[in-house]
């Protein structure tokens, strides 16, 4: 990888963070514009969910493949290609005049996001090798993610009301163009290992098909139910494809995903903890918004503003606090502290009522959700800690894949459970608001359980560094104590 001046590294971080912001922004900005899109383009009720699903499926399904491709053909090359595809697809989405065109554009947006996002952390950890700087860089990147979630909810309402829904897509274009121009100047050129080092076509087909089918199955659970033949059959097929992929990687001469990446206890533990934690955190974002609108009668813009303290808290803590705490106490301790705050927030939300006041019932958990500002950077640090430099793109792709799968599963599970509980209460004679509140309270309780499970994984699986806990993690590319083979030996010992 070519040498990068210190100032250029921080500019490069801004470029990487802009892509993270754009990806998160696009995932949340579209939700508040869906009624306007349905009215203008003639979407049916069943088709409307595909405005979200058509983005989510390729995004989650291609992340692992894209991460490995970044190691093989060059992470900067893949980053540029992904941003170019995303920007072009955003133009197509904004210009769509029928449902089919918009759904196709959303699919391309998801694919472009996957290509760019999969290698972002891989580029980041190779740019910032000094532990203190790396912690700060990861904190800044996590801050932009939190900002994107908040901005998306507010900006979607503003753009749709003030202009029209196509502008929620057109807003991506200038961001994408500026990102590409700056990336050409400040991101280091890396040649990659070459496709011959890992051109496992069969493995690529198996993992991409398995992940896409699995995510499709999960996002359709609310429509079909968990025990329906559709869910069980496609779920089994997805697991079979992923199982075949793992078997293929164990025997392939040039595997797409060298299984040595899974020998690191911290990599495996961080990804598992992230899947559980994001299941609860992202479901909170969706369900509390629905609660405020469907029960308390908030509008779209009011909902976004009401959730602003949570996003600002997450962003502020990730930017100003998390890196310092991780350097002093270690990422594992910081992760567990953040999870305690998140569990407390969900427990408080299990007590909401049909006439809850914002200051008394909603603001306290919104502030406690700031614990996510400790959780997200710590997970990223731990998830990348056991990866060699040659596998940084793969580790980044794996980390982003478990993130997307966790969010998809969380929304599917908690939405289904909330709907089932609401149905039971309606059948028992409860009013609409009471039944909805009962469903959401159950969902928040399950979310608390998922976060407790993430805490248990952090406590029992993640490994405390043998060095002084005050010393931050060393560069995995140069420090033998973070080599997966050493990690495996310590795990067995």
Image (cartoon, helix red, strand yellow):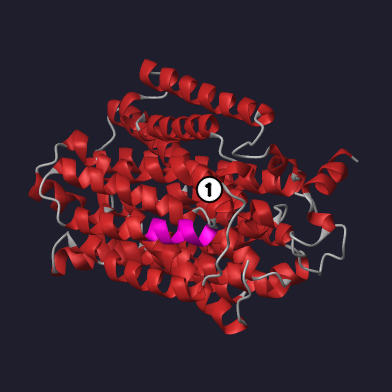
- State the residue in front, 15 or 71: 71
Give percent across and percent down for residue 437. 35, 44
Label 1 neighbour load within 10 Å: few <14, some 14-19, many 20+: many
Q: Indicate the secondary structure of the residue bearing disc 1.
A: helix
Q: Is residue 485 magenta?
A: no
Location of the C terminus (image quadrant): top right
Task: Examine the rendering and report whether any part of residue 277 can be seen.
Answer: no
* Residue at (30, 60) in percent of width and height: 87
Location of the N terminus (image quadrant): bottom right
Give percent across and percent down for residue 284. 44, 50
* Residue at (59, 77) in percent of width and height: 320
Tell me if 477 is positioned left or right of 360 in this view: right
* Residue at (87, 62) in percent of width and height: 467
Instruction: In the displayed orientation, state which residue is furthest to the right.
Output: 493
Q: Which residue is mark 1?
A: 69
- Is 281 above or below relative to 232? below
- Is 202 above or below relative to 95? above
Residue 433, by quadrant, is top left
Which stretch did the figure color magenta? 75-83
* Residue at (39, 70) in percent of width and height: 179
- Is 73 above or below relative to 248? below
- State the residue in front, 15 or 218: 15
Give percent across and percent down for residue 181. 39, 73
Give percent across and percent down for residue 163. 13, 68
Task: Examine the rendering and report whether any part of residue 77 can be seen.
Answer: yes
Q: Main secondary structure of the magenta part?
A: helix
Q: Is residue 81 magenta?
A: yes
| Number of numbered callouts drawn | 1
Tell me if 52 is positioned left or right of 377 in this view: left
């Amino acid at each position: 990888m070519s040498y990068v001046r210190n100032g250029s590294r921080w500019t490069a971080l801004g470029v990487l963070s802009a892509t993270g912001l754009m990806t998160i922004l696009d995932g949340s900005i579209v939700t508040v514009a869906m009624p306007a899109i349905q009215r203008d383009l003639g979407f049916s009720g069943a088709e409307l969910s595909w405005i979200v699903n058509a983005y989510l499926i390729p995004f989650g399904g291609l992340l692992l493949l894209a991460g490995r491709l970044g190691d093989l053909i060059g992470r900067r090359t893949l980053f540029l290609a992904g941003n170019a595809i995303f920007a072009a697809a955003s133009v197509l989405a904004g210009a769509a005049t029928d449902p089919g065109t918009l759904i196709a554009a959303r699919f391309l947006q998801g694919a472009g996001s996957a290509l760019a996002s999969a290698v972002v952390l891989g580029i980041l950890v190779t740019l910032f090798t000094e532990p203190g700087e790396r912690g700060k860089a990861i904190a800044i990147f996590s801050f932009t993610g939190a900002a994107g979630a908040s901005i998306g909810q507010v900006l979607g309402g503003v753009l749709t009301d003030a202009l029209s829904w196509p502008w929620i897509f057109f807003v991506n274009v200038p961001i994408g163009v500026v990102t590409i121009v700056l990336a050409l100047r400040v991101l280091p050129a890396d040649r990659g290992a070459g496709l011959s080092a890992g051109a496992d076509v069969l493995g690529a087909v198996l993992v991409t098909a398995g992940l896409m089918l699995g995510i499709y199955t999960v996002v359709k659970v609310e429509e079909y139910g968990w025990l329906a033949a559709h869910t069980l059959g496609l779920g089994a097929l997805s697991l079979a494809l992923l199982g075949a992929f793992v078997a293929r990687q164990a025997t392939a001469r040039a595997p797409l995903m060298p299984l040595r990446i899974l020998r690191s206890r911290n990599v495996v533990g961080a990804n598992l903890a992230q899947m559980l934690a994001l299941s609860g955190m992202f479901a909170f974002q969706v369900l509390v918004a629905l609660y405020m609108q469907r029960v308390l009668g908030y509008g779209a813009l009011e909902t976004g503003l009401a959730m602003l303290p949570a996003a600002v808290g997450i962003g502020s803590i990730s930017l100003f606090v998390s890196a310092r705490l991780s350097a002093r106490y270690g990422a594992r301790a910081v992760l567990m502290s953040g999870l305690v705050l998140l569990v407390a927030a969900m427990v408080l939300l299990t007590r909401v009522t049909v006439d809850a006041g914002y200051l008394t019932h909603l603001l306290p958990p919104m502030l406690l959700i700031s614990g996510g500002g400790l959780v997200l950077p710590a997970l990223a640090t731990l998830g990348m800690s056991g990866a060699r430099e040659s596998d940084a793109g793969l580790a980044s792709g794996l980390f982003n894949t478990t993130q997307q799968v966790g969010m998809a599963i969380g929304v599917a599970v908690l939405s289904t459970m909330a709907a089932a509980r609401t149905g039971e209460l309606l059948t028992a004679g409860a009013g609409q608001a009471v039944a909805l509140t009962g469903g959401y309270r159950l969902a928040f309780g399950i979310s608390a359980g998922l976060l407790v499970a993430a805490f248990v994984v952090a406590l029992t699986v993640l490994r405390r560094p043998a060095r002084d806990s005050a010393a931050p993690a060393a560069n995995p590319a140069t420090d033998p104590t973070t080599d997966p083979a050493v990690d495996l030996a310590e795990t067995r010992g």
